[in-house]
Amino acid sequence: MTRTPEAADPRGHDLRGHDLRGHGTWLLRGVRPLGAEPADLLLAGGRIAERGAPGTLDAAGADVVDAGGLYALPGFVDLHTHLREPGREDAETVESGTRAAALGGYTTVFAMANTDPVADTAGVVEQVWRLGRDAGHCEVRPVGAVTEGLAGRRLAELGAMATSAAAVRVFSDDGHCVADPLLMRRALEYVKAFDGVIAQHAEEPRLTEGAQMNEGACSARLGMIGWPAVAEEAVIARDVLLAGHVGSRLHICHVSTAGSVEIIRWAKSKGWRVSAEVTPHHLLLTDELAASYDPVYKVNPPLRTAEDVAALRAGLADGTIDAVATDHAPHAPQDKDTEWSAARPGMLGLQTALSIVIDTMVETGLLDWAGVADRMALAPARIGGLPDVPVDASSSMDVGAAATLTLVDPATRWVVDPAGFASRSRNSPYRGMTLPAQVHATFRAGRPTVLDGKVV
Ligand SMILES: NC(=O)N[C@@H](CC(=O)O)C(=O)O
Ligand SMILES: [Zn+2]
Ligand SMILES: [Zn+2]
Protein backbone atom coordinates (compact mmCIF):
# COMPACT_ATOMS: atom_id res chain seq x y z
CA MET A 1 0.00 0.00 0.00
CA THR A 2 1.28 3.46 -0.81
CA ARG A 3 0.68 6.55 1.16
CA THR A 4 -1.65 9.26 0.02
CA PRO A 5 0.17 12.42 -1.11
CA GLU A 6 -1.17 14.22 1.95
CA ALA A 7 0.33 11.81 4.41
CA ALA A 8 3.61 11.42 2.51
CA ASP A 9 4.46 15.12 2.44
CA PRO A 10 7.19 15.50 5.09
CA ARG A 11 6.30 19.13 5.68
CA GLY A 12 2.85 18.11 6.83
CA HIS A 13 1.16 19.96 3.99
CA ASP A 14 -1.11 18.51 1.37
CA LEU A 15 -0.58 19.34 -2.29
CA ARG A 16 -2.84 22.35 -2.05
CA GLY A 17 -0.65 23.77 0.71
CA HIS A 18 -3.08 23.18 3.58
CA ASP A 19 -1.42 22.52 6.90
CA LEU A 20 -2.40 19.01 7.97
CA ARG A 21 -0.42 18.88 11.20
CA GLY A 22 -3.42 20.14 13.13
CA HIS A 23 -5.27 17.02 12.09
CA GLY A 24 -2.48 14.77 13.32
CA THR A 25 -1.59 11.45 11.79
CA TRP A 26 -2.35 8.32 13.76
CA LEU A 27 -1.39 4.74 13.13
CA LEU A 28 -3.68 2.14 14.72
CA ARG A 29 -1.45 -0.90 14.81
CA GLY A 30 -3.01 -4.35 14.71
CA VAL A 31 -6.60 -3.20 15.16
CA ARG A 32 -9.42 -5.58 14.14
CA PRO A 33 -11.98 -3.68 11.97
CA LEU A 34 -15.44 -4.85 13.11
CA GLY A 35 -13.70 -7.78 14.80
CA ALA A 36 -12.18 -9.13 11.55
CA GLU A 37 -8.50 -10.01 10.96
CA PRO A 38 -5.94 -7.54 12.40
CA ALA A 39 -4.88 -4.63 10.20
CA ASP A 40 -3.01 -1.35 10.42
CA LEU A 41 -5.06 1.77 9.82
CA LEU A 42 -3.40 5.10 9.10
CA LEU A 43 -5.57 8.10 9.93
CA ALA A 44 -4.65 11.36 8.19
CA GLY A 45 -6.55 14.42 7.05
CA GLY A 46 -9.57 13.27 9.07
CA ARG A 47 -9.96 10.08 7.04
CA ILE A 48 -8.72 6.51 6.94
CA ALA A 49 -5.81 7.24 4.59
CA GLU A 50 -4.35 3.74 4.37
CA ARG A 51 -5.19 0.20 5.42
CA GLY A 52 -2.70 -2.65 5.30
CA ALA A 53 -1.57 -5.89 6.89
CA PRO A 54 -0.03 -5.45 10.35
CA GLY A 55 3.49 -4.02 10.17
CA THR A 56 3.25 -2.95 6.53
CA LEU A 57 2.43 0.75 6.94
CA ASP A 58 5.11 3.37 7.45
CA ALA A 59 4.60 4.99 10.84
CA ALA A 60 7.07 7.84 10.30
CA GLY A 61 5.70 11.01 11.80
CA ALA A 62 2.54 9.33 13.06
CA ASP A 63 1.42 8.84 16.64
CA VAL A 64 1.06 5.11 17.14
CA VAL A 65 -1.68 3.34 19.07
CA ASP A 66 -0.86 -0.26 19.86
CA ALA A 67 -4.34 -1.55 19.10
CA GLY A 68 -3.61 -5.29 19.29
CA GLY A 69 -6.73 -7.02 20.60
CA LEU A 70 -8.94 -3.98 20.05
CA TYR A 71 -11.91 -3.89 17.67
CA ALA A 72 -12.57 -0.80 15.53
CA LEU A 73 -16.17 0.31 15.04
CA PRO A 74 -17.56 3.48 13.47
CA GLY A 75 -18.05 6.20 16.14
CA PHE A 76 -21.38 5.78 17.91
CA VAL A 77 -24.29 8.18 17.39
CA ASP A 78 -26.86 8.68 20.15
CA LEU A 79 -30.24 9.89 18.92
CA HIS A 80 -31.50 10.47 22.46
CA THR A 81 -29.40 12.21 25.12
CA HIS A 82 -30.51 14.58 27.87
CA LEU A 83 -27.70 17.08 28.51
CA ARG A 84 -29.83 19.25 30.88
CA GLU A 85 -28.19 22.51 29.81
CA PRO A 86 -29.61 25.17 29.91
CA GLY A 87 -31.43 24.99 33.22
CA ARG A 88 -30.26 21.98 35.22
CA GLU A 89 -26.51 22.31 35.18
CA ASP A 90 -26.44 20.68 38.62
CA ALA A 91 -27.57 17.40 36.99
CA GLU A 92 -25.52 17.63 33.76
CA THR A 93 -23.89 20.14 31.44
CA VAL A 94 -23.10 19.93 27.78
CA GLU A 95 -19.45 19.59 28.84
CA SER A 96 -19.97 16.77 31.36
CA GLY A 97 -22.54 14.92 29.24
CA THR A 98 -20.41 15.00 26.09
CA ARG A 99 -17.38 13.90 28.13
CA ALA A 100 -19.44 10.87 29.20
CA ALA A 101 -20.47 10.38 25.58
CA ALA A 102 -16.89 10.34 24.28
CA LEU A 103 -15.88 7.87 27.02
CA GLY A 104 -18.80 5.70 25.91
CA GLY A 105 -17.52 5.70 22.32
CA TYR A 106 -19.94 8.32 20.97
CA THR A 107 -18.86 10.89 18.39
CA THR A 108 -22.28 12.54 17.95
CA VAL A 109 -25.17 12.98 20.37
CA PHE A 110 -28.61 14.44 19.74
CA ALA A 111 -29.48 16.63 22.73
CA MET A 112 -33.13 16.48 23.76
CA ALA A 113 -35.19 19.66 23.93
CA ASN A 114 -36.69 19.34 27.43
CA THR A 115 -34.32 21.90 28.95
CA ASP A 116 -35.17 25.12 30.81
CA PRO A 117 -35.76 27.18 28.75
CA VAL A 118 -37.07 24.58 26.32
CA ALA A 119 -35.14 24.26 23.04
CA ASP A 120 -38.05 25.59 21.00
CA THR A 121 -36.36 28.57 19.30
CA ALA A 122 -33.36 29.13 17.05
CA GLY A 123 -31.68 30.96 19.94
CA VAL A 124 -31.72 28.02 22.35
CA VAL A 125 -30.71 25.34 19.82
CA GLU A 126 -27.82 27.54 18.67
CA GLN A 127 -26.71 28.00 22.27
CA VAL A 128 -26.63 24.22 22.85
CA TRP A 129 -24.88 23.62 19.53
CA ARG A 130 -22.18 26.20 20.41
CA LEU A 131 -21.65 24.75 23.88
CA GLY A 132 -21.08 21.37 22.24
CA ARG A 133 -18.65 22.77 19.71
CA ASP A 134 -16.70 24.61 22.42
CA ALA A 135 -16.51 21.55 24.70
CA GLY A 136 -15.09 19.57 21.77
CA HIS A 137 -15.71 16.05 23.13
CA CYS A 138 -18.22 15.09 20.45
CA GLU A 139 -20.61 16.67 18.01
CA VAL A 140 -23.82 17.94 19.58
CA ARG A 141 -26.86 18.06 17.34
CA PRO A 142 -29.70 19.77 19.18
CA VAL A 143 -33.19 18.32 18.93
CA GLY A 144 -35.86 21.00 18.56
CA ALA A 145 -39.15 20.93 20.43
CA VAL A 146 -42.23 20.14 18.34
CA THR A 147 -44.50 22.44 20.35
CA GLU A 148 -43.88 25.70 22.19
CA GLY A 149 -42.71 24.99 25.72
CA LEU A 150 -43.47 21.26 25.14
CA ALA A 151 -47.01 22.26 26.05
CA GLY A 152 -48.65 20.45 23.13
CA ARG A 153 -50.73 23.43 22.01
CA ARG A 154 -48.93 25.32 19.20
CA LEU A 155 -46.12 24.25 16.87
CA ALA A 156 -42.71 25.68 17.79
CA GLU A 157 -40.55 27.58 15.25
CA LEU A 158 -39.57 24.42 13.38
CA GLY A 159 -38.40 26.25 10.25
CA ALA A 160 -36.28 28.76 12.16
CA MET A 161 -34.57 25.95 14.07
CA ALA A 162 -33.95 24.04 10.83
CA THR A 163 -32.31 27.05 9.14
CA SER A 164 -30.35 28.09 12.28
CA ALA A 165 -26.64 27.41 12.72
CA ALA A 166 -27.69 24.25 14.59
CA ALA A 167 -29.41 22.94 11.40
CA VAL A 168 -31.99 20.99 13.39
CA ARG A 169 -33.42 17.93 11.63
CA VAL A 170 -34.88 15.98 14.55
CA PHE A 171 -37.82 17.40 16.50
CA SER A 172 -39.28 15.94 19.68
CA ASP A 173 -41.31 16.90 22.72
CA ASP A 174 -39.60 14.01 24.52
CA GLY A 175 -40.64 13.74 28.13
CA HIS A 176 -44.09 14.54 26.76
CA CYS A 177 -46.14 12.98 24.01
CA VAL A 178 -47.45 15.05 21.11
CA ALA A 179 -50.90 13.80 22.02
CA ASP A 180 -53.03 16.00 19.72
CA PRO A 181 -53.35 14.11 16.42
CA LEU A 182 -53.87 17.26 14.35
CA LEU A 183 -50.73 18.93 15.76
CA MET A 184 -48.82 15.70 15.10
CA ARG A 185 -50.06 15.68 11.51
CA ARG A 186 -49.06 19.32 11.01
CA ALA A 187 -45.61 18.71 12.47
CA LEU A 188 -45.05 15.69 10.21
CA GLU A 189 -46.11 17.70 7.17
CA TYR A 190 -43.95 20.69 8.11
CA VAL A 191 -40.64 18.84 8.49
CA LYS A 192 -41.08 16.98 5.21
CA ALA A 193 -39.89 20.11 3.36
CA PHE A 194 -36.35 19.71 4.73
CA ASP A 195 -36.38 15.91 5.28
CA GLY A 196 -36.72 16.35 9.02
CA VAL A 197 -38.14 13.74 11.35
CA ILE A 198 -40.53 13.85 14.29
CA ALA A 199 -39.36 11.68 17.19
CA GLN A 200 -42.37 10.73 19.26
CA HIS A 201 -42.38 9.92 22.98
CA ALA A 202 -45.36 7.57 22.61
CA GLU A 203 -47.48 7.83 25.75
CA GLU A 204 -51.21 8.43 25.71
CA PRO A 205 -51.40 10.80 28.70
CA ARG A 206 -54.92 9.86 29.79
CA LEU A 207 -53.88 6.21 30.11
CA THR A 208 -50.83 6.98 32.28
CA GLU A 209 -52.20 9.42 34.83
CA GLY A 210 -50.43 8.77 38.13
CA ALA A 211 -48.51 5.83 36.65
CA GLN A 212 -45.44 4.64 38.55
CA MET A 213 -44.35 1.48 36.73
CA ASN A 214 -45.39 -1.07 34.09
CA GLU A 215 -48.99 -2.24 34.49
CA GLY A 216 -48.97 -5.97 35.10
CA ALA A 217 -48.60 -8.66 37.71
CA CYS A 218 -45.80 -6.78 39.49
CA SER A 219 -47.69 -3.49 39.77
CA ALA A 220 -50.71 -5.38 41.08
CA ARG A 221 -48.59 -7.11 43.72
CA LEU A 222 -46.82 -3.88 44.75
CA GLY A 223 -50.01 -1.82 44.70
CA MET A 224 -48.57 0.79 42.33
CA ILE A 225 -50.52 2.56 39.58
CA GLY A 226 -49.54 0.99 36.24
CA TRP A 227 -48.45 2.40 32.84
CA PRO A 228 -50.11 -0.07 30.47
CA ALA A 229 -48.43 -1.21 27.24
CA VAL A 230 -51.47 0.05 25.33
CA ALA A 231 -50.66 3.65 26.31
CA GLU A 232 -47.52 3.35 24.16
CA GLU A 233 -48.93 1.11 21.44
CA ALA A 234 -52.05 3.21 20.79
CA VAL A 235 -49.96 6.31 20.03
CA ILE A 236 -47.51 4.36 17.85
CA ALA A 237 -50.41 2.86 15.87
CA ARG A 238 -51.96 6.29 15.35
CA ASP A 239 -48.67 7.91 14.36
CA VAL A 240 -47.49 5.27 11.88
CA LEU A 241 -50.88 5.67 10.17
CA LEU A 242 -50.43 9.44 10.12
CA ALA A 243 -46.86 9.15 8.80
CA GLY A 244 -48.06 6.79 6.09
CA HIS A 245 -50.90 9.14 5.21
CA VAL A 246 -48.73 12.25 4.77
CA GLY A 247 -45.57 10.45 3.57
CA SER A 248 -43.34 11.94 6.27
CA ARG A 249 -40.58 10.54 8.45
CA LEU A 250 -41.57 9.39 11.93
CA HIS A 251 -39.20 8.07 14.58
CA ILE A 252 -40.38 6.26 17.71
CA CYS A 253 -38.38 6.97 20.86
CA HIS A 254 -37.56 4.28 23.45
CA VAL A 255 -39.81 1.44 22.21
CA SER A 256 -40.54 -0.76 25.22
CA THR A 257 -43.25 -3.34 24.47
CA ALA A 258 -43.65 -6.46 22.33
CA GLY A 259 -46.83 -4.97 20.84
CA SER A 260 -44.96 -1.84 19.72
CA VAL A 261 -42.44 -4.00 17.87
CA GLU A 262 -45.31 -5.74 16.04
CA ILE A 263 -46.93 -2.46 15.01
CA ILE A 264 -43.62 -1.03 13.75
CA ARG A 265 -42.92 -4.24 11.81
CA TRP A 266 -46.33 -3.91 10.17
CA ALA A 267 -45.81 -0.20 9.39
CA LYS A 268 -42.47 -0.95 7.75
CA SER A 269 -44.05 -3.72 5.67
CA LYS A 270 -46.34 -1.02 4.24
CA GLY A 271 -43.28 0.93 3.09
CA TRP A 272 -43.98 3.83 5.46
CA ARG A 273 -41.02 5.95 6.56
CA VAL A 274 -40.94 4.83 10.16
CA SER A 275 -37.88 4.21 12.33
CA ALA A 276 -37.48 3.21 15.96
CA GLU A 277 -34.96 3.05 18.79
CA VAL A 278 -34.61 0.89 21.90
CA THR A 279 -32.64 1.79 25.02
CA PRO A 280 -30.01 -0.47 26.59
CA HIS A 281 -32.04 -0.64 29.82
CA HIS A 282 -35.13 -1.93 28.04
CA LEU A 283 -32.93 -4.65 26.47
CA LEU A 284 -31.79 -5.89 29.88
CA LEU A 285 -33.93 -4.91 32.87
CA THR A 286 -37.50 -5.87 33.83
CA ASP A 287 -40.30 -4.52 36.02
CA GLU A 288 -39.47 -7.05 38.74
CA LEU A 289 -36.78 -4.58 39.84
CA ALA A 290 -39.46 -2.19 41.08
CA ALA A 291 -40.01 -4.59 43.99
CA SER A 292 -36.82 -3.13 45.48
CA TYR A 293 -38.53 0.29 45.61
CA ASP A 294 -35.14 1.67 44.53
CA PRO A 295 -35.99 4.71 42.38
CA VAL A 296 -32.90 4.17 40.25
CA TYR A 297 -35.18 1.73 38.35
CA LYS A 298 -37.91 4.30 37.75
CA VAL A 299 -37.94 5.38 34.10
CA ASN A 300 -40.28 6.36 31.26
CA PRO A 301 -41.41 4.29 29.55
CA PRO A 302 -41.19 1.87 32.49
CA LEU A 303 -39.17 -1.32 32.59
CA ARG A 304 -41.45 -4.02 31.17
CA THR A 305 -41.64 -7.82 31.34
CA ALA A 306 -39.19 -10.54 30.27
CA GLU A 307 -41.45 -11.24 27.25
CA ASP A 308 -41.13 -7.61 26.17
CA VAL A 309 -37.35 -7.73 26.61
CA ALA A 310 -37.18 -10.81 24.37
CA ALA A 311 -39.33 -9.12 21.68
CA LEU A 312 -37.18 -5.96 21.79
CA ARG A 313 -34.00 -7.99 21.35
CA ALA A 314 -35.53 -9.89 18.43
CA GLY A 315 -36.77 -6.62 16.88
CA LEU A 316 -33.34 -5.03 17.14
CA ALA A 317 -31.73 -8.15 15.68
CA ASP A 318 -34.03 -8.29 12.62
CA GLY A 319 -33.88 -4.51 12.03
CA THR A 320 -37.51 -3.75 12.93
CA ILE A 321 -35.93 -1.54 15.57
CA ASP A 322 -33.27 0.42 13.71
CA ALA A 323 -31.08 1.81 16.46
CA VAL A 324 -29.97 1.74 20.06
CA ALA A 325 -30.38 5.11 21.80
CA THR A 326 -29.37 5.70 25.39
CA ASP A 327 -32.08 8.08 26.69
CA HIS A 328 -29.27 9.15 29.06
CA ALA A 329 -31.33 10.97 31.72
CA PRO A 330 -29.19 12.35 34.52
CA HIS A 331 -30.94 13.48 37.70
CA ALA A 332 -29.62 15.29 40.77
CA PRO A 333 -29.81 13.46 44.12
CA GLN A 334 -32.65 15.61 45.47
CA ASP A 335 -34.77 14.56 42.46
CA LYS A 336 -33.80 10.88 42.41
CA ASP A 337 -32.76 9.70 45.88
CA THR A 338 -36.28 10.02 47.25
CA GLU A 339 -39.20 7.71 47.82
CA TRP A 340 -40.26 5.97 44.58
CA SER A 341 -43.36 8.07 43.89
CA ALA A 342 -41.51 11.39 44.26
CA ALA A 343 -38.47 10.40 42.16
CA ARG A 344 -37.99 11.68 38.62
CA PRO A 345 -37.95 8.99 35.94
CA GLY A 346 -34.76 8.33 33.99
CA MET A 347 -31.34 6.68 34.17
CA LEU A 348 -27.78 7.27 32.97
CA GLY A 349 -26.74 5.44 29.81
CA LEU A 350 -23.83 6.88 27.86
CA GLN A 351 -20.95 5.09 29.56
CA THR A 352 -22.63 1.69 29.77
CA ALA A 353 -24.54 1.46 26.45
CA LEU A 354 -21.95 -0.52 24.51
CA SER A 355 -21.46 -3.03 27.33
CA ILE A 356 -25.20 -3.63 27.69
CA VAL A 357 -25.56 -4.12 23.93
CA ILE A 358 -22.67 -6.61 23.91
CA ASP A 359 -24.15 -8.43 26.90
CA THR A 360 -27.71 -8.63 25.54
CA MET A 361 -27.16 -8.89 21.78
CA VAL A 362 -23.64 -10.16 20.97
CA GLU A 363 -23.00 -12.61 23.80
CA THR A 364 -26.47 -14.06 23.13
CA GLY A 365 -25.64 -14.57 19.43
CA LEU A 366 -28.38 -12.20 18.21
CA LEU A 367 -26.06 -9.64 16.58
CA ASP A 368 -22.47 -9.66 15.30
CA TRP A 369 -20.07 -6.71 15.60
CA ALA A 370 -21.03 -5.37 12.17
CA GLY A 371 -24.59 -5.41 13.46
CA VAL A 372 -23.53 -3.42 16.53
CA ALA A 373 -21.86 -0.90 14.21
CA ASP A 374 -25.08 -0.57 12.26
CA ARG A 375 -27.43 -0.21 15.25
CA MET A 376 -25.17 2.11 17.29
CA ALA A 377 -23.56 4.22 14.56
CA LEU A 378 -24.83 4.01 10.99
CA ALA A 379 -28.59 3.65 11.44
CA PRO A 380 -28.86 6.47 14.00
CA ALA A 381 -26.65 8.68 11.81
CA ARG A 382 -28.99 8.10 8.89
CA ILE A 383 -32.13 8.74 10.94
CA GLY A 384 -30.62 11.94 12.36
CA GLY A 385 -29.69 13.21 8.90
CA LEU A 386 -25.92 13.33 9.42
CA PRO A 387 -23.87 13.80 6.24
CA ASP A 388 -21.62 11.16 4.60
CA VAL A 389 -22.99 8.08 6.33
CA PRO A 390 -21.20 4.95 5.01
CA VAL A 391 -23.53 2.63 3.09
CA ASP A 392 -22.74 -0.27 5.39
CA ALA A 393 -20.56 -1.25 8.32
CA SER A 394 -17.77 -2.71 6.21
CA SER A 395 -17.34 0.46 4.12
CA SER A 396 -16.97 2.48 7.33
CA MET A 397 -13.56 0.78 7.64
CA ASP A 398 -12.44 1.42 4.03
CA VAL A 399 -9.73 3.81 2.87
CA GLY A 400 -11.40 7.17 2.33
CA ALA A 401 -14.01 6.72 5.08
CA ALA A 402 -14.13 9.31 7.86
CA ALA A 403 -11.72 8.50 10.69
CA THR A 404 -14.55 8.66 13.19
CA LEU A 405 -13.92 5.48 15.12
CA THR A 406 -14.40 3.76 18.43
CA LEU A 407 -11.78 1.27 19.59
CA VAL A 408 -13.23 -1.36 21.89
CA ASP A 409 -11.57 -3.91 24.13
CA PRO A 410 -14.00 -6.82 23.64
CA ALA A 411 -12.34 -9.17 26.12
CA THR A 412 -12.33 -7.08 29.29
CA ARG A 413 -14.92 -7.17 32.05
CA TRP A 414 -15.43 -4.29 34.42
CA VAL A 415 -17.46 -3.46 37.51
CA VAL A 416 -19.74 -0.44 37.18
CA ASP A 417 -18.96 2.32 39.69
CA PRO A 418 -21.03 5.43 38.93
CA ALA A 419 -18.73 7.49 41.20
CA GLY A 420 -16.16 7.26 38.42
CA PHE A 421 -18.50 8.41 35.64
CA ALA A 422 -17.99 11.72 33.83
CA SER A 423 -21.67 12.57 34.26
CA ARG A 424 -22.57 14.99 37.05
CA SER A 425 -25.26 12.54 38.15
CA ARG A 426 -24.98 9.05 39.60
CA ASN A 427 -28.30 7.40 38.72
CA SER A 428 -27.00 4.28 36.98
CA PRO A 429 -29.09 1.11 37.39
CA TYR A 430 -25.97 -0.99 36.68
CA ARG A 431 -24.03 -0.05 39.84
CA GLY A 432 -21.97 -3.03 41.00
CA MET A 433 -22.70 -5.13 37.92
CA THR A 434 -19.86 -6.80 36.02
CA LEU A 435 -20.20 -5.94 32.33
CA PRO A 436 -18.33 -7.04 29.18
CA ALA A 437 -16.35 -4.83 26.77
CA GLN A 438 -15.04 -1.33 27.26
CA VAL A 439 -14.24 1.66 25.08
CA HIS A 440 -10.49 2.14 24.85
CA ALA A 441 -10.29 5.10 22.44
CA THR A 442 -12.55 7.34 20.40
CA PHE A 443 -11.49 9.23 17.27
CA ARG A 444 -13.48 12.01 15.71
CA ALA A 445 -12.46 13.09 12.20
CA GLY A 446 -8.97 11.68 12.78
CA ARG A 447 -8.37 13.18 16.21
CA PRO A 448 -8.63 11.30 19.48
CA THR A 449 -11.22 12.47 22.00
CA VAL A 450 -10.46 9.50 24.25
CA LEU A 451 -7.21 7.53 24.53
CA ASP A 452 -6.50 4.70 26.97
CA GLY A 453 -9.97 5.11 28.42
CA LYS A 454 -9.34 8.77 29.33
CA VAL A 455 -10.61 12.00 27.80
CA VAL A 456 -7.89 13.69 25.75
N1 LIG B 1 -36.79 8.71 30.18
C1 LIG B 1 -37.12 9.30 31.30
O1 LIG B 1 -37.58 8.61 32.22
N2 LIG B 1 -36.93 10.61 31.51
C2 LIG B 1 -36.53 11.58 30.54
C3 LIG B 1 -37.65 11.99 29.64
C4 LIG B 1 -38.04 10.95 28.62
O2 LIG B 1 -37.16 10.39 27.93
O3 LIG B 1 -39.22 10.68 28.43
C5 LIG B 1 -35.96 12.79 31.27
O4 LIG B 1 -35.84 13.86 30.68
O5 LIG B 1 -35.58 12.64 32.43
ZN1 LIG C 1 -39.28 9.97 26.42
ZN1 LIG D 1 -35.69 10.99 26.86
Image (cartoon, rainbow, N blue to C red):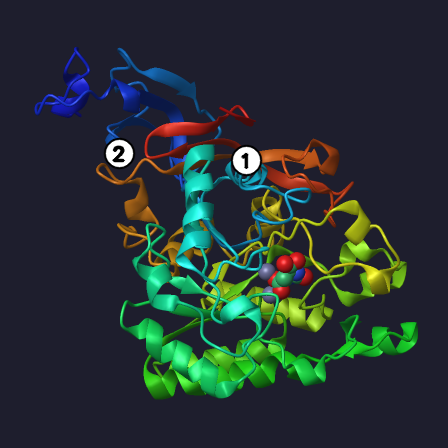
**Relative to 252, is 131 above or below?**
above
The x, y position of residue 128, in whole percent, is: 47, 47
- Residue at 33% x, 22% y is 26
Q: Is residue 282 visible?
A: no
Q: Which mark is residue 99?
A: 1
**Residue type (three-letter) at the residue carrying disc 2:** Arg
Q: Which mark is residue 47?
A: 2
Q: How many marks?
A: 2
Q: Which quadrant of the figure shows ligand 3?
A: bottom right
Q: Quadrant of residue 231?
A: bottom right
Q: CA distance from mark 2 to mark 1?
A: 23 Å
**Relative to 257, is 6 above or below?**
above
Q: Quadrant of residue 75?
A: top left
Q: Residues within 10 Å of mark 1 (few under 14, many from 20)?
A: many
From the viewer's side, name the closer residue of 450 and 284: 450
The x, y position of residue 20, in whole percent, is: 22, 22
Q: Which mark is residue 39?
A: none
| Label 1 element class | helix
Ligand 3 within 8 Å, label 2 CB: no
Q: Nearer the viewer, mark 2 or mark 1?
A: 1
| Label 2 element class | strand
From the viewer's side, name the closer residue of 196 and 428: 196
The x, y position of residue 1, in whole percent, is: 17, 25
- Residue at 42% x, 83% y is 185
- The answer to which of marks 2 and 1 sits earlier in the sequence is 2
Q: Is residue 278 visible?
A: yes
**Relative to 191, is 342 above or below?**
above
**Residue type (three-letter) at the residue carrying disc 1:** Arg
- Residue at 66% x, 84% y is 230
The x, y position of residue 293, in whole percent, is: 88, 60
Question: In this rendering, would 428 be left or right of 68?
Answer: right
